[in-house]
Image (tube, rainbow, N blue to C red):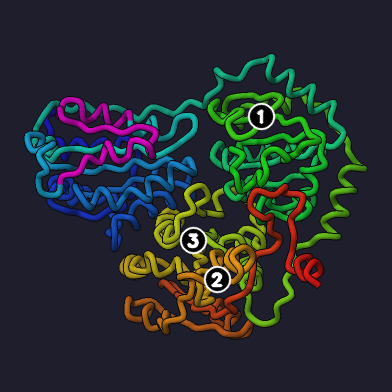
Amino acid sequence: MELTGAQIVIECLKEQGVDTVFGYPGGAILNVYDELYKHQEIRHILTSHEQGASHAADGYARSTGKVGVCFATSGPGATNLVTGIATAYMDSVPIVAITCNVNVPLLGKDSFQEIDIAGITTPITKHNFIVKDVTKLADTIRRAFRIAQKGRPGPVLVDIPKDITAAKTEYEFCKAEPIARVTDTIREEDLAKALAMIKAAEKPYIFVGGGAVISGASAELKEFVHKVDAPVCDSLMGKGAFDGTNDLYTGMLGMHGTKTSNLGVSECDLLIAVGVRFSDRVLGNAKKFAKQAKILQFDVDAAEINKNIRVDAAVIGDLKEILKRINAELPQLGHEAWIAHILDYKVKYPLTYQEPGLTGPYLVEEIYRQTDGDAIIVTEVGQHQMWAAQYYKYKNPRTFLSSGGLGTMGYGLGAAIGAQVANPGKQVINIAGDGCFRMNMNEIATAVRQKLPLIEVIVNNHVLGMVRQWQDLFYEKRYSATVLDDGVDYVKLAEAMGATGYRATTRETFNEALKAALAAKTPVVIDCVIGCDDKVWPMVAPGADISTAFTGEDLAAAQS
């Protein structure tokens, strides 16, 4: 059957089981949108900005494990996707971005709305393509979906000149291939060494990252943890891979990790790293990180082994399969004294906040209470992000969505839209700082248009909170360009875009607003006014040993 390039794009999306596309039309991609109009089985979400489309595709993918898809036209349409693509790349999120460009004869001539988007995105995609021959279009799109999903996932971009979307060629349906897990790199000798190290350890600690979420390894991880009988900490991306309500869970590791996790990892004799990349925000001072421990790393990506920290052994491959094989050979171990020691730390160093009234930690705890810990929590980046990671207990994977690697302010609202579209039966809540909300608040209009019951909680301290915290602690209180106290009324903004708006200045008014929001069927924005000097504790100073994590009380005692 002979089809145009635009028809082939849509047919290939149907082959891959795509049910939703996020995007924004324009001249170069008109042929594709005209064809999309005829296929109602693919839902198109028109965002307010292309960056919102890329973040929505990301949120769709993170919350489901499926590939998120976004469309953009040439020139600025394509470049507006870049931040979202980079966000997905840093956090290993499978998205396929389809852009269209000027006609092939006009490429390289500075034509109207021409941009070399393939060149621009080369460092931030797993792979990208520009298709200049319509006969190669179908196979290229199919390959893009395979690359996005296989092994360590990531974004792939396909750029299609407009005349290729109009050209015709033969098309034959091809059923999507199942994506095989990476198992051929799992060596028996590596498994044997790992098992020997685990059995020999007297003080093991398990550190879980986003790879465990991506591989769907939660059940195997739970069995592994209980067989090893070890405490568990996680990275920001690892939230929910291991049940945050389990007694063996000790919280996040690193700059804003718990004292229990930071001290425990500093004292352990074996650190088992499951799907982590040892970010600088986790390591602190890499030379002093886990110095008493041997380090055993499980990861699908060989490039992560010995990249940020030297390890003593590694098993490379799909985490679910690695843990299955380890569990099959691992006897039940017991580390009662070590577990008791770590549990004593949990009692001695709980996460606490002393501030009366409405605070970031209180907001997150109340959200947890009213949702029974069953919401999909999305965040922007900053203090509120850390509070959401610390004070909400994530029982399941794919329920915490946040920009970890790139730290993208403005990520959350678009991602929340993607997550809510993908999970209509779940409550999605985006927790945002007022600085982040300003960046992409136009997507409230998208949520209203789609009648999405998502909730936007603005943690409004009238400053760029995390930057101010650093200015307060390390820059002698020089608050350069971080004050946002300019009278913006977020309730009126929400109402102007068609959402319901509430303002909360006390615990009681927030509790009431959240209760009303959870009962609503359309978007709700809650503007929560908190103090400008609330801080995220504990904290490790940049470049310091993670065992030196300190709290506000520690700081006050040292200064007195």
Residue at numbered disc 3: 380
* Most common SS among magenta residues: helix
Picture residue at 37% right of the left edge, 36% below the top: 123
Q: Please count the marks in the image.
A: 3
- Above or below, 470 relative to 201: below
Quadrant holding the C terminus: bottom right
- Residue at mark 1: 310
Give the number of the disc on residue 478.
2
In the figure, is residue 384 to the left or right of 490?
right
Under circle 3, the secondary element is loop
Stretch in magenta: 114-143
In space, the residues marked 3 and 2 are separated at their CA atoms by 24 Å
Q: Are marks 2 and 1 in contact (CB under 8 Å)?
A: no
Which residue, as the protein is rendered here, is positioned at the far right? 337
Q: Name the amino acid type tagged 1.
A: Arg
Residue 262's x, y, as percent?
A: 75, 49
Q: Which is in the foreground here, disc 3 or disc 2?
A: 2
**What residue is at 65 percent from the left and 48 percent from the top?**
543
Instruction: Report the residue at 56% width, 64% height from top.
Output: 466
| Residue type, mark 2 in image | Arg
The disc at residue 64 is none
Res 228 visible? no
Between 14 and 477, which is closer to the camera in this rendering? 477
